[in-house]
């Protein structure tokens, strides 16, 4: 999306109502989009910085699969 990605009402509901969402890779990615619409370059930059700082396996997975996770969230209607 040239204008960036943001959560849809369904995505917000997923974050608010699904217990343990932040334990999943998709949940962590969605939570990072909660504040505003973000372009792919900004999302990649944020996750690269998070990866450098935290060095966790989850941050590594999310960064390496970022475009696939965004595609999945887009197809599921969680982001637009």
Image (cartoon, helix red, strand yellow):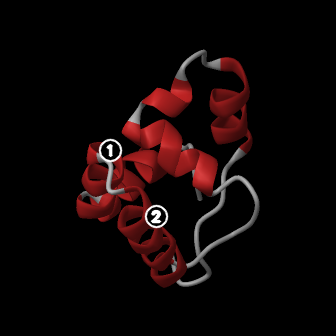
Question: Residue 7 placed where, x, y %?
Answer: 66, 52
* Vertical placement of residue 18 versus 24, above or below: above
The disc label shown at residue 50, or none: 2
Describe residue 8's horizontal placement relative to residue 64 as left or right.
right
The single residue placed furthest to the top in the displayed view is 19
Q: CA distance from mark 1 to mark 2?
A: 10 Å
Q: Residue 42 placed where, x, y %?
A: 53, 80
Between 78 and 59, the one lying in front of the other is 59
Quarter holding the C terminus?
Answer: bottom right
Question: x%, y% of residue 38?
Answer: 62, 73
Q: Which mark, by number, is residue 28?
A: none
Residue 19 position by quadrant: top right
Position of residue 70 measured from the top left corner of the image (x, y, whole percent): 41, 57
> Could you say which is closer to the camera, residue 79 or residue 32?
32
In the rendered structure, find residue 58 and report the number of the disc placed on it: 1
Q: Nearer the viewer, residue 39 or 29?
A: 29
């Amino acid at each position: 999306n040239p204008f960036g990605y943001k959560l849809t009402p369904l995505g917000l509901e997923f974050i608010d109502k699904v217990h343990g969402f932040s334990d999943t890779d998709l949940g962590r990615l969605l939570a990072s989009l909660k504040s505003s619409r973000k372009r792919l370059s900004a999302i990649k930059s944020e996750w690269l910085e998070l990866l450098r700082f935290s060095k966790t396996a989850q941050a590594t997975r999310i960064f390496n699969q970022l475009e696939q996770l965004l595609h999945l969230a887009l197809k599921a209607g969680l982001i637009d």
